[in-house]
Image (cartoon, rainbow, N blue to C red):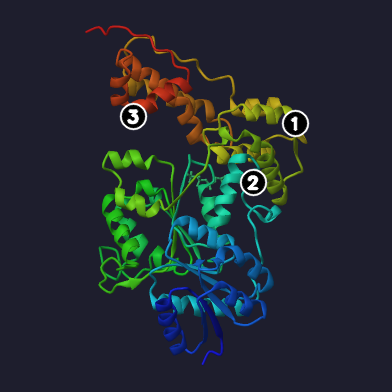
Amino acid sequence: MSGHTVLLADDDAAIRMVLNQALTRAGYEVRPTGNMSTMWNWVSRGEGDLLITDVHMPDGNAFDIMPKIKKLRPDMPMIVMSAQNTFMTAIRASEVGAYEYLPKPFDITEVLSVVQRALADAKKPPARDRNVEDAGDAMPLVGRSPAMQDIYRALARLMQTDLTVMVTGESGTGKELVARALHEFGKRRNGPFVAINMAAIPRDLIEAELFGHEKGAFTGATARSSGRFEQAEGGTLFLDEIGDMPMDAQTRLLRVLQEGEYTMVGGRTPIKTNVRIVAATHRDLSQMIRQGLFREDLYYRLNVVPIRLPPLRERVDDIGDLVSHFLNAAQREGEPVKTISPDAIRLMQNYSWPGNVRELENLVRRLVALYADESISAEVVQNELNIGERPSVTASTGPVDVSTAVEAHVAQLLREYEPKLPPAGLYQRVLDRVEAPLIAMALNACAGNQIKAAELLGLNRNTLRKKIRAHSIEIVKHSRRG
Ligand SMILES: Nc1ncnc2c1ncn2[C@@H]1O[C@H](COP(=O)(O)OP(=O)(O)OP(=O)(O)O)[C@@H](O)[C@H]1O
């Protein structure tokens, strides 16, 4: 006998009976009731060790009294069941302090395992109560702009759930940081956080990396090797650059997510998996679906909760906080104390940050390492960002060989950057500066015809139009000669 008493509130007599039987058989003492007032009487008298409650009951909504219960009985886990199993119900359950939310119909064995887990967790000393919005220095996500506040609120709601999250945003906007925050502040924080970057692994090895392989599964597999799913068991698996996943691996991943089990490469035995998935990409997956490069069904599996991180240029108010954060970090690593002038911050706020927060972080590191002055001036920032040196671009110079011209341009940029150390963020900088001339040249090659230029570039027409506007490229139509 476990010796624990479970309070069970549900107006559906059949559910009360089924749960009562299963819980009694598992050794719990069960107190069933069909209304909220009886449940509240028990709770307020300090009775019961755990509460399982339906949301809608004849005399009220459990969500309305759960915050009161949480205050009165903080150590009593509450499990919420609801037939209205929408995402909002899950979020609401987490907001009112539910330990777990179980959508109806539920699996009895799952209820029993959640009850067992909840009672075991209640015995452990409470984990430090960390909150994304007021965690101060310990909180890795910096920025107080309205855009970031929205992200924090979304994260706070997601902390206590196991919902799959898809983080999108340009490179360097903090997607991995968000995935880590979801893990470190969520209920899986005592489990592992495992990340895998699809773009960094040879395509034919991705499945073995994810699911592991048996000895002899392929040439070179000299021993059994665990995969990321196995390593992340009980924790969070971060699938970075999911848009770079080959089709075969996508199919396999979808099956695993649907069935909750996988087999190792070269293996036969299905292995059950319990991981929370957070995926991320800087790519436009809807476009990839249209192009047949990403499975739509996998997209819907992964995109249960989308979080879009805005580019830094859309939240320039955060730049001051971010710069201080990176200056403090440098100082903690033994670099000298530095301050930054308001003019320098203003200048940074007018820059486009194609590499986003990563580019800003690299810039601050460079400034700290390379300049001796205690205060970082606007001139120094201007110099480092190469602001004002961007070549002005027009598309009126006649037909050109795009690839040779772009190659020459890249070569020239590299020569320009070469003497400066360290070349951090170089990839984004070069891309940013190559994009405008590339588009201009493609337009030229197509005699100013945007539809043809979009085709040549392999860009969506709208994307091309936006980029033309963003770079202020002037289009001059001309007829092509022979
Ligand atoms: N809000 C933030 N506060 C503090 N640091 C941040 C923030 N956002 C990003 N960073 C820092 O910027 C760098 C890039 O962040 P991260 O790697 O999470 O970006 P990403 O979007 O995953 O990039 P990529 O798509 O290139 O993998 C990291 O060093 C991270 O610590």
Q: In which quadrant of the rendered view does residue 127 lie?
A: bottom right
At mark 3, the secondary structure is loop
Residue 398 visible here: yes
Which amino acid does the dot numbered 2 rest on? Val
**Measuring 69% from the left and 25% from the top, which residue is drawn there?**
379
Q: Nearer the viewer, mark 2 or mark 1?
A: 2
Taking 433 as reference, is 181 left or right? right
Q: Position of residue 17 (x, y in %)?
A: 42, 82
Q: Is mark 2 within 8 Å of ligand 1?
A: yes
Residue that badge 2 annotates: 142
Q: In which quadrant of the rendered view does residue 98 lie?
A: bottom right
Residue 409 visible here: no
**Measuring 61% from the left and 45% from the top, which residue is drawn there?**
149
Residue that badge 3 annotates: 460
Taking 127 as reference, is 415 left or right? left
Q: In which quadrant of the rendered view does residue 108 lie?
A: bottom left
Which amino acid does the dot numbered 1 rest on? Ser
The mark that comes first in sequence, 3 or 2, is 2
> Quarter of the image containing the C terminus?
top left
| Relative height, residue 127 to residue 322 (above, below) | below
Which amino acid does the dot numbered 3 rest on? Asn
Residue that badge 1 annotates: 341
